[in-house]
Image (tube, coloured by chain):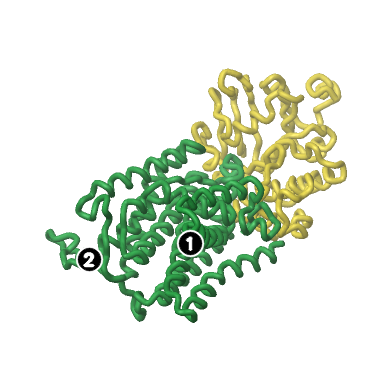
Chain colours: A green, B yellow
Amino acid sequence: MIRREGIINTLIFLSLPAVAGAALLLDEPFTITLATRAAILALAAVGLNLALGLGGLVSLGHAAFFGIGGYAMGILASHAQSYVPLIDTWIVIEGTKSMPVIWLVAVIASAFAALAIGALSLRTSGVYFIMITLAFGQMFYYFAISWPAYGGEDGLSIYVRNDFPGLNTLVPIQFFGLVFTILALVLWAMGRLAASPFGLALNAARQNAERVETVGLTPFRLRLVAFVISGAITGLAGALFADLNRFVSPSMFSWQMSGEFIVFIVLGGIGRLFGPVAGACLFVVLEHMLSGVSEFWLIYVGAILLLVVLFARGGLIGTLAGRAVAHD
Amino acid sequence: MTLLRMENVQASYGQTQALFGVDLQVGEGEVLALMGRNGMGKSSTVKVMCRLLKHASGQVQFAGMDLGGMPPHVAARAGLGLVPEGRRCFPNLTVYENLIAAARAGVWSFAAVTELFPRLAERRDQMASSLSGGEQQMLAIGRALMTNPRLLILDEATEGLAPVVRQEIWAALARLKAETGLALIVVDKSLAELSRVSDRAVILERGKSVWTGTMDVLNAEVADRYLGV
């Protein structure tokens, strides 16, 4: 069964470059952009899956980190675009159009935000944890709306895509390749993390926190570290998402965005390494196909989600692999 | 040298008092049997030792440290290993993962645990939830050993296990005593087996320690009065 799940994972993962490659041959750049969008959303959900799937932390505020990553990109790139330094006091900090620098800032900023939010929210559990993370996410959302320096409610447009050494990132397939490589690296790292003593202890803490304490581990610390790594990955996805759209807006912080990440994970399979990838791909395909059928396309997605929750508890991957319980 | 000492320990679950004055001590390399009928406070005493239940009064000291106010994970790191009642392995982890999730450096490693319980090596990649009760108990003991404790506490060591599996567990405990000199506190109902493995016994009655002594003086009259056997 594990072998079958491995084959399914590989097929789902390779479907992304297969679609992008086919679109390149057929000269369909929009489809490449769709595949890139799916890969970025998958990356965001892979981040959340560490907290939600492995740690059992149902965070309804992960859009906060997605938005922080997005605004890290927007703020740095807009200053580079306007040639106005970001900070111009006794120390001068310029904006930048360099993707690696933007990613680093996005990861560090979202990690610090996750540390602060996690340190407070992880003192609660269950529905209180869901509510407190939701509240933090909404705080960021309303802050972004009322921040006129960076577009307020209208958001912030960036005219040119940021640079990555050796690539022309405006060419869709090159940008896709970059995003896909990051997704592959993060998935590899997540796989290693889940199998490490830290990942196992986090998994164990989800199953029985008291028992974990009696073997000398602290569930709070395990969960906080997981929450910070999780937030940092979602932040990185936010920076890439903003770069894909060349636009950031407060909607990146919205609770609907957090909800979508959870939907990706549930659709694909909670706690499965490739679950978020399957879920995000399925969601983007449904979004693309169903939005042409009806403007109320989310109703159909809702119905599918309902069916998955009721009849396919292991999500898409669990159903295909014939195993409801995840074990990556 | 005394490793764990409890003096006049009283503890409650909310308004309900469970322990009314427990005194016991266990020394390095010693095996202590903690006995008593159902509901007499054995598991509550174990919980106080492992800090899963805070005592309201009295003294609990481990290796010279006062355990009052110490959270369970710090007590575990100080060297208190627990094999809980009902085993409680992590069901969604494999045997190997259950063992390494809690591992700390020391003499106990995966190889050493599977040398004690060869069946765990055979089941290495099997989910804990798919193991038999006896194998789960071996895994729970192995998991506690992987933390390299100074004192191993087994709550209901062989409860609900088949006779043949019980013998394996008792044989393993006897080996632990003979070969490693690890201090043990064993809670169980089998007087015959406890007599073979333990050096001393403490009997609890209604949340109080009412009898303490070596196993050779635990005669039929004491057993009949406090244990109903």
Q: Could you say where residue B201 lies in the image, as x and y percent from the top left?
A: 74, 31
Residue A288, numbered label? 1
Q: Residue at x 85, y 35 (%)?
A: B192
Which one is in front in this view, the residue at disc 1 or the one at disc 2? 1
- Residue at 52% from the left image edge and 51% from the top image edge: A263
Vertical arrangement, residue A250 with respect to residue A39, above or below: above
Q: Marks 1 and 2, how far apart in space? A: 35 Å
* Of pointers 1 and 2, the one earlier in the residue sequence: 2
Provide the residue designation for mark 2: A95
* Residue at the image position 65 percent from the left and 51 percent from the top: A312
Q: Is residue A194 visible?
A: no
The answer to which image quadrant residue B107 occupies is bottom right
Q: Which mark is residue B85?
A: none
Q: What chain does badge 2 belong to? A: A
User: Could you tell me which quadrant the N terminus of chain A lies in?
Assistant: bottom right
Q: Position of residue B148 (x, y in %)?
A: 62, 50
Tell which of B55 and A292 is nearer to you. A292
Labels 1 and 2 within one chain: yes
Residue A38 position, x and y percent, is 47, 64
Q: Amino acid at mark 2?
A: Gly
Q: Is residue A21 above or below residue B177?
A: below
